[in-house]
Each structure stands twice: as structure tokens, then as C-alpha cells.
Amino acid sequence: KKRAPMPDDIRARKGGEPLVSLTAYTTQMAELMDAHCDFVLVGDSVGMVLHGLPSTLGVTMEMMIMHGQAVARGLSSAMMVVDMPFGSYEESPQQAFRNAARIMSETGAAAVKLEGGVTMAETIAFLVARGIPVMAHIGLTPQSINTLGGYKVQGRGDAGDALLADAQAVSEAGAFAVVLEKVPATLADTVTAAVAIPTIGIGASAGCDGQILVVDDMIGLFTAFKAKFVKRYANLGADAEAAFAEYAREVRAREFPAVEHLFADTLPEKNK
Ligand code: KIV
Ligand code: NA
């Protein structure tokens, strides 16, 4: 079985075979995707996907660490990256280091991810210089939803130059990869050609150096809404609901449990 890549191995995949990534929040899902992904992200999307929060702003360090520990138990050949939650890194490089170090030591993550471009470059350099590999995340950054004014496409028209500057800043600061979320495809291609590190697209371009999706979105378990950039590869939510309905019907009809699910009062002949 192959060993998990390190952040430097991911960086070295720039321009090569596309990197494959999904989010995960539980051991079971991590186990199912382990052999198929280069890296797995414990995203702060966990707040919306598993905890019913209205945005990622309410996600805590404790949530990220608990889900990071669960995912780590399910991975052996994919690298694990854990998101830094809102409020855990923006104040200063020192605050970011303190919380990133805690995430790394308590979950065993190989790297952390944080949102921001030019603004976070100093913090990224501070972390990398102190042993913490950083994946950056620019374009639509959901933790800034209140200042971005909604989940709209980022970097259209004149805003493209600022997005390119963000990508260059995080690359020069030492990030080993950068997530591009919800940007025009042509801009994603321009950024991918311009920066030295792999771009990981979500609502970006097939020309990115890799792709990521939120697992519950792509298997149809999270159905509160579906972004245009999500492709549904399965409809497990509908399957689960049908199972719940059938179980309820069978219980009410006394069809479940059936004989094969029950225990006799005497031992079977072969066990005597
Ligand atoms: O939290 C998350 O799931 C993410 C990915 C969408 C990149 O940040
Ligand atoms: Na995230």
C-alpha cells in the first residue's frame, strides 16, 4: 500500500496528473475515499454539512479537532489537511501558530488550510517558517461571507487582477497549494499558469492542478442546496430516506423484525 504524500509531494505535482481531493468529517467516509484521493480535507464546511449551522462562522477549534481525529483514523494512503476555523488565525501570526500547532499535534494533520490571499501572506510565511505546511484558499472564502456580500462568483472583470495578486502572494509566502473557489474558468487558468504551486479548483476550471468537492454534496447526502459547481455522483440522501420510510412501514405492519432477525430459546443443534 502506498504511503500518504507529504505537502512537498503535493507541491511537486504542479502541472502533472490532476490532484484528487474530497472533504471528509468522519472515519467511515475517510476510509471509503482513502485509496482514491491524494489528500482529504477536513473542511470547516462540517459546520453546515453535519451540524446544521447557517454558515461556517460558528465552527470552533474543538469541532475541527474532533472531526480531524475521526478522519485521521480512516486514512492511510491519503494526506490529511485540516481547515483553521473562523477567528482562530486572523488576529496575528502568533495566534495562527498557536492554533495551527494545536490542530497539527492533536489530529496528526500534515497541513492546515486557511482563507485569504495578500492579507494572510505574512501569516502563511510565519507558519511555514515554523514547521506548519499551509494550503491557502482564495476566491470565494466562505468565512468572509459578511464582507463579500454573499456567495457570488469572485474575480470577474477588474477583480481578476486582485485574485491573481492573492495567488502570487500565497505562493511566494510558501503555501504548498492554493484552493480557488468559485472564480471564472479563464481566470482560474490564468492563475494556474502564473503561480508555482498547484491550484485546487472548486467551481474554477478543469485546467486547475487538482479538484476538490464537499463529499456530502457530491454523494447527495447534503441536499439543503446544490451549488452550480457541484456534480452529484450519487443520491444517497434519497436512498436513505427511502430506507427510513420502508423501515417505518415494516415496523408498523409488524413485518420487521422477521424470523431470521430473532433468537430461539434453545441452542441450534450444531452448537450443542
Ligand atoms: O470547508 C470546505 O469544505 C472547503 C472546501 C470547499 C475547499 O474549504
Ligand atoms: Na473551508
Image (cartoon, rainbow, N blue to C red):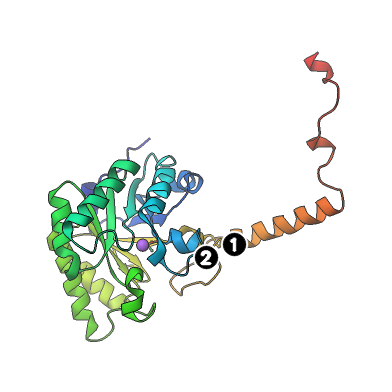
Q: Are marks 2 and 1 in contact (CB under 8 Å)?
A: yes
Instruction: Between residue 2 and residue 93, name the one nearer to us.
Output: 93
Whole-percent x, y for residue 228 in the image: 46, 75
Quadrant location, the N terminus:
top left
Q: Which mark is residue 235?
A: 1
Q: Is mark 1 within 8 Å of ligand 1?
A: no
Whole-percent x, y for residue 104 in the image: 28, 45
Whole-percent x, y for residue 13 in the image: 24, 53
Q: Is residue 154 left or right of residue 55?
A: left
Q: Quadrant of ligand 1?
A: bottom left
**Looking at the image, can residue 228 be seen?**
yes
Vertical order, 24 against 121 (above or below): above
Within 10 angstroms of label 2, few (less than 14), some, or many (20 or more) residues?
Answer: some
Residue type pointed to by label 1: Asn
The image quarter in which residue 78 lies: top left
Vertical order, 136 against 78 (above or below): below
Q: Which mark is residue 232?
A: 2
In the image, what residue occupies the spot 52% across and 72% down? 225
Residue type pointed to by label 2: Arg
- Label 2 sits on a secondary structure element that is loop
In the image, what residue occupies the spot 32% across and 79% down? 148
Q: Is residue 131 left or right of residue 114?
A: left
**Which residue is most to the top?**
272
